[in-house]
Image (cartoon, rainbow, N blue to C red):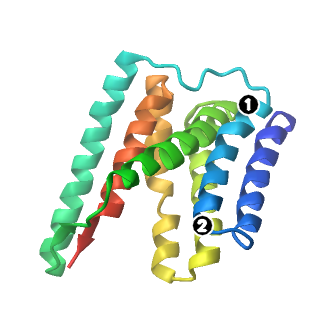
């Protein structure tokens, strides 16, 4: 348990910092600071992992797995639209939205949660489940504390399930780029698709 002290304290420091900053700064500033902290904490913890190691074979494998999982997601959305009578559409957005999702969300979260925490906890199935719980709790604490809406809280609690996929991708492919790819695509689809 002693070997997990630093990653657990790092996680608590991150969550507490973001939670406190939300009460004093605007959301855009907090968003940027939290991304910087997620990238900085692993380096300050003296981990010698190469977070941005690119393994082309692992990345291609990760992309194929991601596309399969996302195809299942589309199938669920299609069935939901048939049952509910609500049909999916696409929200309009600019190019900056995509850059923000990649640079301030997918990359920092994957470096911190998969590249740092999951690796520190053993990069095995147990670590995937533990880090996915921490990932969902972080989303619940930070988003629900400011939004107050039940549906928003439930959606953020459900981040546990895509986090399992991201953890599996990292464990099986050996490169964060496969989990970054899935994280980016899943966020884009979840945010852009609306039902009316």
Q: Which residue is mark 2?
A: 27
Q: How many marks?
A: 2
Q: Which residue is mark 1?
A: 43
Element carrying mark 2: helix
Between circles 1 and 2, the one closer to the viewer is 2
Screen quadrant of the N terminus: top right
Task: Please indicate, yes or no, whether residue 116 appears anywhere in the rendered image.
Answer: yes
Which residue: 65% across, 38% down?
A: 39
Element carrying mark 1: helix
The quarter holding residue 64 reads top left
**Closest to the observer, 80 or 88:** 88
Q: Position of residue 146 (x, y in %)?
A: 62, 76
Q: Earlier in the sequence, mark 1 or mark 2?
A: 2
- Gap between marks 1 and 2 measured at Cα: 25 Å
Vertically, is 26 above or below 96? below
Q: Position of residue 160 (x, y in %)?
A: 51, 56
Q: Position of residue 51 (x, y in %)?
A: 58, 26
- Residue with the most extreme right position: 2
Circle 1 packing at 10 Å, graded few (<14), some (14-19), many (20+), is some
Q: Indicate left or right for 6 with 72 as reference.
A: right
Q: Indicate left or right for 172 with 190 as reference.
A: right
Residue 67 is tagged as none
Q: Indicate left or right for 143 with 13 as reference.
A: left
């Amino acid at each position: 348990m002693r070997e997990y002290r630093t990653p657990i304290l790092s996680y608590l420091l991150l969550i507490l910092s973001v939670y406190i900053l939300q009460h004093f700064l605007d959301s855009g500033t907090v968003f940027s600071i939290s991304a910087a902290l997620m990238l900085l904490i692993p380096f300050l913890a003296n981990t010698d992992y190469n977070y941005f190691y690119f393994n082309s074979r692992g990345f291609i494998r990760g992309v194929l797995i991601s596309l399969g999982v996302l195809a299942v997601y589309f199938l669920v959305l299609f069935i939901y639209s048939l049952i509910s009578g609500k049909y999916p559409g696409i929200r309009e957005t600019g190019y900056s939205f995509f850059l923000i999702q990649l640079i301030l969300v997918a990359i920092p979260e994957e470096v911190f949660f998969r590249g740092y925490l999951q690796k520190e906890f053993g990069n095995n199935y147990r670590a995937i489940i533990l880090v996915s719980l921490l990932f969902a709790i972080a989303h619940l604490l930070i988003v629900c504390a400011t939004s107050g809406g039940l549906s928003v809280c439930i959606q953020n609690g459900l981040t546990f399930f895509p986090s399992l996929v991201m953890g599996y991708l990292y464990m099986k492919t050996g490169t964060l780029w496969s989990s970054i790819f899935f994280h980016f695509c899943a966020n884009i689809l979840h945010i852009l698709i609306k039902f009316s």
